[in-house]
Amino acid sequence: MLKVAHVVRRAGIGTGVGSVADAVCVQMRRDGIDAVLFTLRETGWRWGEPKGKLAPLLRVLEIVWFTAAGSVIARLRYPSKDGWVVFSHNDALVGQVYVNHGVLREALRMRPDTSWRWNPLHRFLLAREWLRHRSRG
């Protein structure tokens, strides 16, 4: 039986990328596929949805944490040798299938102003995109 893990930082209605991952996972289960969601909760992250004045900082920490810890934990938990196929939705660097919900580099390239270059999160996300899409041949 096919086993699929959807790796996504947050899942559920109203989470954008996470709502897509959740819907695909539900449909796979209906179709008889053993499908699971791997989210922040599975990494040990316990701070909930960032709110208040510290929300932007917590969101950055959450993204960096999930990219690093989530990638390692998901790789260990869902090895392909055990029949797992991993779908990565945006924030992780793991999986056989990358579901592209948007490419930041191209979106930023289209912006007329260059103020985004000073945002450290954008620099991190661009480096992560480069790692994900680099040639491995």
Image (spheres, rainbow, N blue to C red):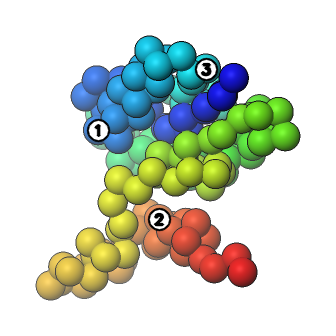
Of the 4 image quadrants, the one containing the N terminus is top right
Pointer 1 residue: 16
Quadrant housing residue 3: top right
Q: Nearer the viewer, residue 100 or 122?
A: 100
Residue 40 relative to residue 11: left or right: right
Check if mark 3's residue and mark 2's residue have beta carbons within 8 Å: no
Q: Position of residue 119 (x, y in %)?
A: 37, 70
Q: CA distance from mark 3 to mark 1?
A: 23 Å
Give whichever of discs 3 and 1 has the lower sequence position: 1
Residue 79 in view of the camera: yes
Residue 60 in view of the camera: no
Outermost residue on the right side: it is 81
Q: CA distance from mark 1 to mark 2?
A: 17 Å
Residue 56 relative to residue 78: left or right: left
Q: Position of residue 85 (x, y in %)?
A: 66, 39
Pointer 3 residue: 34
At label 3, counting other C-alpha atoms closer than 10 Å, the crowd grade (few under 14, some 14-19, many 20 or more) is some
